[in-house]
């Protein structure tokens, strides 16, 4: 196992040795230049991300849950991704969960010592009655955070699927994962500040894991959020536009359809395009395992058809 100073994310890049005497414009240029390397680093591990998505989809289809565990910035990013799934995809309560070392307080104030406790994550996960149908994603830029390693080790003992997201190659945490994702982001502009490039890489990977999984579960029609929750005026207007585009109707017709569908976008689209009431629309969606394209009788992708047949 490499020492802390041997980790790529902890090394100092000579290009940035004069940051303290650089102008504001020079600082921003160098940060922006460094950030451009992150998507390319993520692109190199797309096969691993694909494996992770397939694993997540398989477990969620079985009724399992998706857990993110991490400390500091990594933990906050996991909590953020989990929190955004219900409004974006109407995931049921508890289907996507984010856990951070140090608990809720650590979201708003650094609790740095919490990441060194390898027993905290198992205790946190025990409270959710973890099972073999669940999948746990451990997020750690360094690849050696005890909180994450302890959580993944516990998850494996239960039989849960495990995924590790790190920003160093040959990471220790990868040994505890069914699918390791190692994004080599290299030294930071500010040496060791992994909330920068490493944090950006982690955010990009988590975006892919959750969004691609929800696509595979029928939460999207074309590229539209047809399973979104309508909880405020902005989202209501977005929902109306989605119905207008999908059902090819005007604003007033979309508004009426959404009202009749109790705010359910998928049902509203079906009601308009099929000329049915909400009860029939709900039945058609249920028979199609939630895939709107299948419920509409349109040509389905192979993945969507597989989901319907599952």
Image (cartoon, grey):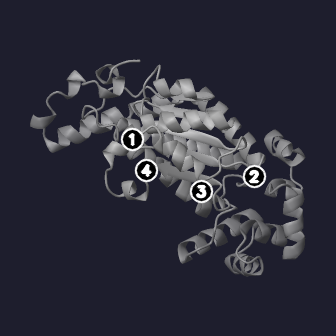
Q: Looking at the image, is mark 1 or mark 3 nearer the viewer?
A: 1
Question: Which is more foreground, mark 4 or mark 3?
Answer: 4
* Earlier-in-chain disc, 2 versus 3: 3
Separation of residues labelled 1 and 2 (CA atoms): 36 Å
Quadrant the N terminus occupies: top left
Quick check: 49 left or right of 109?
right
The answer to whether residue 44 shows anywhere in this view is no
For the C terminus, the image quarter is top right
Q: Earlier in the sequence, mark 4 or mark 1?
A: 4
- Helix, strand, or loop for circle 4? helix
Q: CA distance from mark 2 to mark 3?
A: 14 Å
Give the residue pinned by disc 1.
Answer: 115
**Circle 2 residue:** 218
Q: Nearer the viewer, residue 257 or 99?
A: 99
- From this view, report whether residue 227 is shown above or below residue 276: above
Image height of 4 relative to 267, above or below: above
Where residue 261 sits, quadrant-wise, is bottom right
Residue 85's disc is 3
Callout 3 secondary element: helix
Where is residue 20 shown, x and y percent of the image?
12, 36
Q: CA distance from mark 4 to mark 1?
A: 13 Å
């Amino acid at each position: 196992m490499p020492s802390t100073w041997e980790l790529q994310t902890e090394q100092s890049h000579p290009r940035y040795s004069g940051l303290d005497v650089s102008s504001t414009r020079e600082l921003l240029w160098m940060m922006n230049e460094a950030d451009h390397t992150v998507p390319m680093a993520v692109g190199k591990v797309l096969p691993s991300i694909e494996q992770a998505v397939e694993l997540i989809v398989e477990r969620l289809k079985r009724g399992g849950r998706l857990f993110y565990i991490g400390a500091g910035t990594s933990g906050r990013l996991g909590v953020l991704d989990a929190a955004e799934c219900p409004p974006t995809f109407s995931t049921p309560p508890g289907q996507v969960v984010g856990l951070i070392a140090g608990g809720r307080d650590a979201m708003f104030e650094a609790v740095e010592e919490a990441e060194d406790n390898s027993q905290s994550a198992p205790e946190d996960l025990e409270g959710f009655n973890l099972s073999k149908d669940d999948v746990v994603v451990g997020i750690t830029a360094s690849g050696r955070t005890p909180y994450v390693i302890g959580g993944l080790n516990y998850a494996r003992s239960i039989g849960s699927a495990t995924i590790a997201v790190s920003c160093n190659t040959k990471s220790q945490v990868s040994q505890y994962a069914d699918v390791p994702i190692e994004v080599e982001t290299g030294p930071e502009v500010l040496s060791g500040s992994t909330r920068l490039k490493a944090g950006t890489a982690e955010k990009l990977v988590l975006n892919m894991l959750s969004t691609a999984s929800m696509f595979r579960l029928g939460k999207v029609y074309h590229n539209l959020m047809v399973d979104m929750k309508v909880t405020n005026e902005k989202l209501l207007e977005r929902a109306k536009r989605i119905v207008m585009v999908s059902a090819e109707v005007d604003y007033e017709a979309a508004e009426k359809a959404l009202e009749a569908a109790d705010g359910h976008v998928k049902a509203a689209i079906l009601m308009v395009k099929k000329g049915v009431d909400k009860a029939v629309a709900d039945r058609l969606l249920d028979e199609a395992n939630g895939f709107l394209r299948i419920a509409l009788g349109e040509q389905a992708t192979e993945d969507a058809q597989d989901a319907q047949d599952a």
